Image: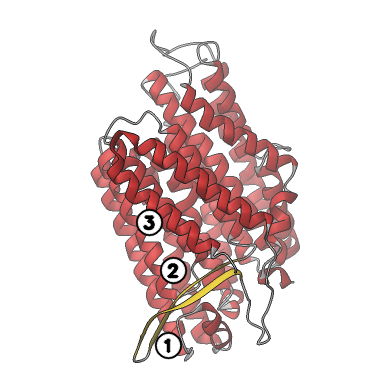
Amino acid sequence: MTIPILSLSLITLLVGTVACFAAGRWARYVALGTAVAFLVEIGWMISQFTWAGFGPTGVPSYSYGETYAWIHLYWLNINYSVGVDGLSLPLLLLTGILLLVTVVYSWEEKKRPSAWFALVLMTCLGCAGVFMALDVLLFFLFWELVLIPMFFMIAYWGGLRRRYAALKFFVYTHVGSIVMLVSLLVVAFYSHAPSFDFSAMYGPARALALVPQVFLFLAMLFGFGIKFPIVPFHTWLPDAHVEAPTGGSVLLAGLLLKLGAYGLIRWGLELLPQGLLHTQPIIFAVAFASIIWGAFVALGQRDLKRMVAYSSINHMGIVLLAIGLYSSLGITAAVLLMFAHGIVSALLFMVAGSTHHAFGTRDLATIRGITPKTPALATVTMVGALASLGLPALISFPAEFLALLATWDGIGYWVFVPLIMLVVTAGFYLWMMQRMLFGPTSGIPEDAHDLSQWEAAAMAMLVALTILYGVLPGLLTNVIIHSPLFGLP
């Protein structure tokens, strides 16, 4: 009997979420046990992973697939349909990793810990469901589920302007969600697909005429792009990051931004390839704008957390560029870069949170020369900064190298745009390290302290993964290539 491992992993997160709400002061232990169990399940999937390939009708057949009738009423044919391939499995692994490190980092949370840990698990439940779902309505259900816990995490545990930031996050992303849903439903109805299942929509959607494909793909680019976020629909992100608690920022940057990129690939690129090919100039323009804007605005920030937030816009712009190239190398680079950014941004947001805990501020013009006082914090800050700027042997280097190589193969000398912006990225991280770590000591209060044991444990896991996947990127690329998209030029 085949184990329904995908449903089992979702049930694990669901049970953990409900149990945390009821566990009181034991919620952290429930959350930790749930995170470990989920990560073990994902690890088992990767160890046994063999992509199912294409079925006899030329439609992708996904590994660990499960399909059960859900709502069949009149013309509505909605299934509980889940499955994974080389695109979604690395992102599920990222979900498990960030769930575990967020629980560990937040171990000493004192403000309603049962609700906090339950919302962390609920966020990861929604993200995992998005990466597994192969039915439009099931996908949308999990997509919207993510908004609820993140809204409350920002609104209740956030900073001084938390309610404004939470409302702005919700409004922006919900508008994008509605546009995304409408475009997917139009694809299903206009193509006369027999159901909302991905396999049922695959052939009819790809056979649509060029004009509908172009308009529908642009609608998806807008809907998914808000979650990316792409310029000019990015303004919710810095506010949400600055006001969110550290654990919320980790999940927001590490997972929620990846939902937009994943959705654009799975439902946009795979279903409407001609729409993508004929809107490439628009995609490249938006990607270059995000790359340039994110890099230069990050260069002018004094708040460490806001600087990392704007650098996320820069990095996700490179992901959009890689997707728009419509090549096997580009998609591989995009997925690898999503995974790398998830790890590195989580580390840097933890650095920003711990800096605020230790010194009472994140202002880079105030705190200088922290290394003698907080050597552990200084060490992980340097590793995170060097990884984000693309130092060889760290996780971002192979991802960015593949992205640049794919850009050169696809659009030639335009590669100098992201290449020059990577130099700007290196500039603001080196500037940050010079002032914060190695400059003259100033702005350090007497009661400043180094990392707590839980903060250090969470960051140590991310540092280890940053080095592991930087030295052995094949651990991920050997999974990523098992996808129908690897047959692209």
For the residues labelled 1 and 2, the Cα–Cα distance comes to 17 Å
For the residues labelled 3 and 2, the Cα–Cα distance comes to 11 Å
Q: Nearer the viewer, residue 388 or 45?
A: 45
In the rendered structure, find residue 189 and report the number of the disc placed on it.
Answer: 1
Find disc 2 in the rendering and name its residue: 139
Which residue type carries mark 2? Phe
Q: Earlier in the sequence, mark 1 or mark 3?
A: 3
Which residue type carries mark 1? Phe
In the rendered structure, find residue 285 and report the number of the disc placed on it.
Answer: none
Find disc 3 in the rendering and name its residue: 146
Q: Position of residue 24 (x, y in %)?
A: 28, 37
Query: Image height check: is 453 above or below 479?
Result: above
Residue 295 in which image quadrant: top right
Asked if disc 3 and disc 2 are in contact, CB closer than 8 Å, the reply is: no
Q: Nearer the viewer, mark 1 or mark 2?
A: 2
Q: Quadrant of the C terminus?
A: bottom right
Residue sitting farthest toward the top = 446
Q: Nearer the viewer, residue 370 or 354?
A: 354
Residue 171 in which image quadrant: bottom left
Q: Secondary structure at mark 1?
A: helix
Query: Image height check: is 113 above or below 118?
Result: above
Q: Secondary structure at mark 3?
A: helix
Q: Position of residue 62 (x, y in %)?
A: 61, 71
Query: Image height check: is 407 above or below 398?
Result: below
Dot 1, crowdedness within 10 Å: few (<14), some or many (≥20)? some
Q: Earlier in the sequence, mark 3 or mark 2?
A: 2
The answer to whether residue 363 is visible is no
Q: Nearer the viewer, residue 423 or 109?
A: 109
Residue at coordinates 57% horizontally, 71% vertically from top-left?
A: 65
Residue at coordinates 39% horizontally, 73% vertically from top-left?
A: 181
- Relative to 188, 461 lies left or right: right
